[in-house]
DNA sequence: CGTGAAACTCACACCGGCGTCAACTGCAAC
DNA sequence: GTTGCAGTTGACGCCGGTGTGAGTTTCACG
């Protein structure tokens, strides 16, 4: 499938898809004329990539993670499991941060006033 | 107090402090020679600002929020309360997003494999 | 008076995912 | 042939908080 179709099907801009390919997140065969030719399964993959971006992962992390996810769970190596665990830990750590900041803001909301700035 | 002292006391670089002043988050008097002269209470304020940055607020939002936090809760206007509520809602929405993404990653971890890319 | 630390202003760079423009080519339809 | 859409590469811009460097001034101390 061509890049326009893939963009349509996955809801991602052609610019982003080229970016993904450039950074090795997806692969495309080329027609004799040089046009990208994507496999149908790439739609699913792009949607997944979007989720990972939404979770705050950078393209480098996604690039490490994708090969892990390609193996079924029972065949994954310890390294793969470790990468997955790391990213989960990162997310959970971020969740803790947010929880803390929510508490701080809630406390500020009900508690005392902050010192005013001198003019 | 001078900018170096403030930087030391608050753990924030002088560059950032100048940025904060430039954007109205903190105020500084000036000595005759043009050096910034910060009030002692600014330390506390800078620490708070760091928390708000950590919570993902941008300087513009912080700028709106700070005057609200300067009034004690009982004297706050409806507008102030609304701003606070908005930022809290933003944070809570972000927390929900993260929770969702954690679930997705956990599911990916245990469930099926992603289709491999054709070479 | 000289020296060095610390302050000042101005300005450029970075990160990273993507928008967007430019200049060019491929290909189907009329 | 030509029109026009879809594709190609390459490059620049953006955002926003900071790092960093250059070139200058202030001020405490010997």
Image (spheres, coloured by chain):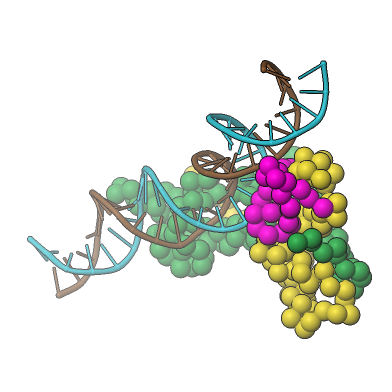
Chain colours: A green, B yellow, C brown, D cyan
Query: Residue at horizontal 71%, vertical 49%?
Result: B30
Nearest the camera: D13 or D28? D28
Q: Answer above or below: position of B5 versus A105.
A: above
Quadrant (top left, top right, bottom left, bottom right) of the C terminus of chain A: bottom right
Q: Answer above or below: position of B90 versus A78.
A: below
Q: Give the range drawn in magenta.
A: B11-39
Q: In this view, does A52 lie to the left or right of B93?
A: left
Query: Residue at horizontal 50%, vertical 63%?
Result: A12
Q: Which residue lies furthest to the bottom in this view?
A: B78
Q: Does the magenta stretch include residue B16?
A: yes
Q: Answer above or below: position of B7 versus A103.
A: above
Nearest the camera: B5 or A31? B5
Query: Residue at horizontal 76%, vertical 77%?
Result: B80
Give x and y (percent) for residue A116: 82, 64
Q: In this view, does D10 lie to the left or right of B107?
A: left
Q: Answer above or below: position of C22 versus B70.
A: above
Give x and y (percent) for residue A30: 38, 48
Q: Is residue A53 magenta?
A: no
Q: Which residue lies furthest to the right in this view?
A: A111
Nearest the camera: B72 or A27? B72
Is any atom of residue B102 visible in this view? no
Give x and y (percent) for residue B15: 68, 44
Quadrant (top left, top right, bottom left, bottom right) of the N terminus of chain A: bottom left
Nearest the camera: B38 or A65? B38
Is any atom of residue B45 visible in this view? yes
Number of numbered discs on residues: 0
Give x and y (percent) for residue D20: 62, 33
Which of the 4 quarters of the picture holds residue A50?
Answer: bottom right
């Amino acid at each position: 499938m061509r890049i326009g179709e893939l963009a349509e099907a996955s809801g991602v801009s052609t610019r982003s898809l080229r970016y993904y390919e450039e950074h090795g997140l997806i692969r495309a065969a080329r027609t004799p004329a040089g046009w990208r030719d994507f496999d149908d399964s790439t739609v699913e993959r792009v949607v997944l990539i979007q989720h990972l971006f939404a979770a705050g992962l950078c393209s480098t992390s996604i690039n490490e993670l994708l090969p892990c996810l390609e193996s079924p769970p029972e065949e994954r190596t310890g390294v793969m499991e470790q990468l997955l665990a790391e990213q989960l830990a990162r997310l959970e750590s971020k969740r803790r941060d947010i929880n803390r900041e929510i508490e701080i803001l809630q406390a500020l909301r009900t508690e005392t006033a902050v010192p005013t700035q001198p003019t």
